Amino acid sequence: MSVRTAVRNPLVAGVVGAVLGAAPLATLYSIAAPTMAHAQGSPPPAAVTSAQPRGGVAVMLPDFTTLVKKFGPAVVNIRVIEKAAEEGDNNPFGPNSPFAPFFRGLPFQAPPEQPIRGEGSGFIIQPDGLILTNAHVVEGATRVTVQLTDRREYSAKVIGVDKVSDVAVIKIPADHLPTVTLGNSNSLQVGQWVLAIGAPFGFENSATSGIVSAKGRTLPDSGYVPFIQTDVPINPGNSGGPLFNMQGQVIGINSQIYSRTGGYMGVSFSIPIDVAMQVAHQLLSTGHVERGKLGVVIQNVDQGLADSFGLPEPEGALVSSVERGGPAARAGVEAGDVILALNGQPVQASTQLPVRVATLMPGTTVQLTIWRNHAKHDVSLRLASMGDETVASAQHPQQQGGSLGLAVRPLSHDEQQQTHTHGGLLVEGVTGPSEDAGIQPGDVVLAANGQRVSTVEALRSAVEKSRGHVALLIQRGGTRIFVPVQVSAAAAR
């Protein structure tokens, strides 16, 4: 678990601005807060009151007092502790450090590492203590403590974490707890009043309000969630708290802000409750989340591209490449096709397609309407599993493991024949240590520390057994080479 104010990597304004049309120098922040180191019947609608400004025109304003009184007790404050980095290769004073021999016998000792503490919010969805929050609030935590509004505290168990959607489910050992009422985020309208309750800067059960600014926002590094944008004041510590509509129903989980400073500047984002609950149900039933995959790389269609392909309007998702052996390739989809609709629903922008596909289960048969050679064509295909599984990254924070920073999948039979290999894992994404070592998407991992790997589990096992470094046998084109990778600190534990 990284620094709580910005768990998701901040992006430069040029990249984010291109997606959101934001002002320069703004950055996307998660909103969990760092701290000092040392059954429910019909929900009551929010009342509306009128104010009489000097101009004499009555202004109708919402009154959230009844809503806060009824559902505020179901909002909890979450405190987390992450284990400090242990002595190892990254600690210049640790016993495994190359400098250790120079310090042996000296009359001083390196100061102990302080644990990392953070805070966030959550809300109770079942009276037996089931709670929803953000994944980045509890990710990597060794201890999670939940405090209720009546000051009772419980040690929480992390049931499941899904970093892709930033949703987590935790549970406390309690019964007969107050709960929220879940609503339908699909019925939410831009301009509606909404209310957030959470613990900004640790001030638990704070209520702030605003309106829905937009729906279906796709953010950098969060391409599978259609975020709700609001102007509700949200600050560090609000992360994981509920967003209510005027009927007292939760329609979102407060997740991120867009800011130049790391504090609230009028743009906040929430995960739609429909998306969150779909993820929660899978975490509860299987411990992980499955998402459908088309097997294409897409880009947006601007006016110039529309003119080039003869499209009447600049719409749809342009296929820039097709994964070999994937569902789209088997169905005959080609680079240069423009996907105009999925199951009869128009795709206005490319950002809409991954969100819709991710909500479908692997194995689902879908109909694509594509534009090719100045005409529409219908294509039927069966979705595969997204399978974007980062090697040695635990689903549950209690199960610590090392991280290579690789997203891999087993090679298909055809791919093995094409690359003249037996087994092996295709690299689909690279970050962190592996990126630093020079590994690239498209490389094939054949072995780790001399052991052949044909499954993700085999690679994960090799990483967990390593002592800080793992030698990967990589095939790139017709060349094979060993690449040493320093595993992240978690692997050396």
Image (cartoon, helix red, strand yellow):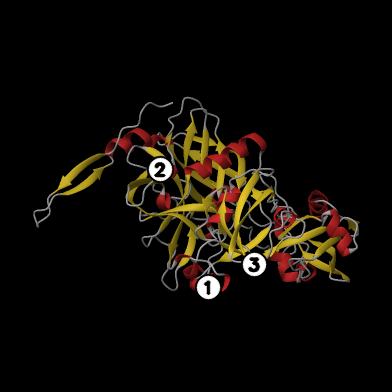
Measure the C-alpha gap from mark 3 to mark 1: 13 Å
Q: Position of residue 121 (x, y in %)?
A: 46, 45
Determine the secondary structure under disc 1.
helix
Determine the secondary structure under disc 3.
loop
Q: Position of residue 30 (x, y in %)?
A: 50, 57
Is 241 situated left or right of 294 in this image?
left
Amino acid of disc 1:
Asp
Name the quadrant containing residue 434.
bottom right
- State whether residue 216 appears in this view: yes
Quadrant where the N terminus lies?
Answer: bottom right
Amino acid of disc 3:
Gly
Is 489 situated left or right of 348 in this image?
right
Determine the secondary structure under disc 2.
helix
In the picture, the disc for residue 367 is none
Q: Residue at x 19, y 43 (%)?
A: 49
Q: Is residue 307 above or below residue 56?
A: below
Label 3 belongs to which residue?
Answer: 336
Measure the C-alpha gap from mark 1 to mark 2: 35 Å
Q: Nearer the viewer, residue 415 or 57?
A: 415
- State whether residue 467 appears in this view: no
The mark nearer the N terminus, 3 or 1, is 1
Label 1 belongs to which residue?
Answer: 307
The mark nearer the N terminus, 2 or 3, is 2
Q: Residue at x 50, y 25 (%)?
A: 175
Q: Residue at x 54, y 33 (%)?
A: 172
Label 2 belongs to which residue?
Answer: 187
